[in-house]
Image (cartoon, rainbow, N blue to C red):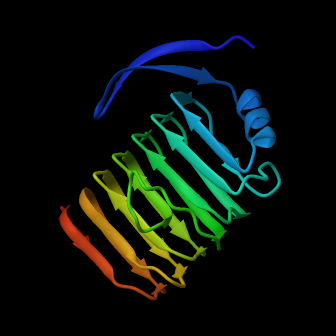
Amino acid sequence: MAANIIIQNIGKIDKIIMEQISVIEFSTRIQNAGEIAAFQDLSFTFDFSISQDNCKSKRLTFEKCKFSKTFEINNIDLTLGIAFNDCVFSEYLMIQGVTISGQFVEPRIDQRNNSFLIENCKIDKALSMNSNQFLRDIKIEGSSIHELVISNLTSTEGGFILRKSIVEYYVTFEQCRFSDSIRFQEVNCKDSLR
């Protein structure tokens, strides 16, 4: 499998060497991944949807990846969660119909475990989270997002944390239930909270 290697400057990441992966190669990697599917330094130039049909992993982790097209995670039970670290999304990140019912602790990030984590990422269009059921916190830290739209989300033992981040347009919560608080710390929301 031949892969193109590219050098990019993406936000806080300078001159990272990335592998430009094809849709076929990524499909194969996600289908053959173990319990924790971890992807690093990849450039995605295609729309892709991860679902129960093409992924049997219990946790997804993406680090230092660039997504040029819409990236979706939908209709899947991941049990142990989702994490994006130092990633750039030129289009949409859509999380829909996802269930995260287990526990996973990442001591380097936080002693408290998170079901969903976005850390030091840039999303040029929107992060849309719809009809998800998470056990623990949803945490976004050190990130820049154009729009943040959260609807029909339940966190049975956690809350929502938005920290040290910029939201360019607006933040919307609709029909959400959290057992813990919704916390905004050092957040710059340039338009409104709905």
Q: Quadrant of the C terminus?
A: bottom left
Q: Residue at x 50, y 83 (%)?
A: 157
Q: Quadrant of the N terminus?
A: top right
Q: Quadrant of residue 12?
A: top left
Q: Residue at x 77, y 50 (%)?
A: 55
The residue lying toward the viewer, choosing from 193 and 31, is 31
Is 20 placed above or below 168 here?
above
The residue lying toward the viewer, choosing from 186 and 110, is 110
Q: Residue at x 38, y 60 (%)?
A: 110
Residue 143 % position (x, y): 31, 51
Number of numbered discs: 0
Residue 162 % position (x, y): 30, 66
Is 72 placed above or below 181 here?
above
Q: Quadrant of residue 58?
A: bottom right
Q: Is residue 194 visible?
A: no
Residue 139 % position (x, y): 39, 64
Is 63 placed above or below 150 here?
above
Q: Taking 143 as reference, is 80 left or right?
A: right
Q: Taking 29 as reference, is 167 left or right?
A: left
The residue lying toward the viewer, choosing from 148 and 4, is 4
Q: Is residue 73 visible?
A: yes
Residue 94 % position (x, y): 55, 57
The residue lying toward the viewer, choosing from 144 and 147, is 144
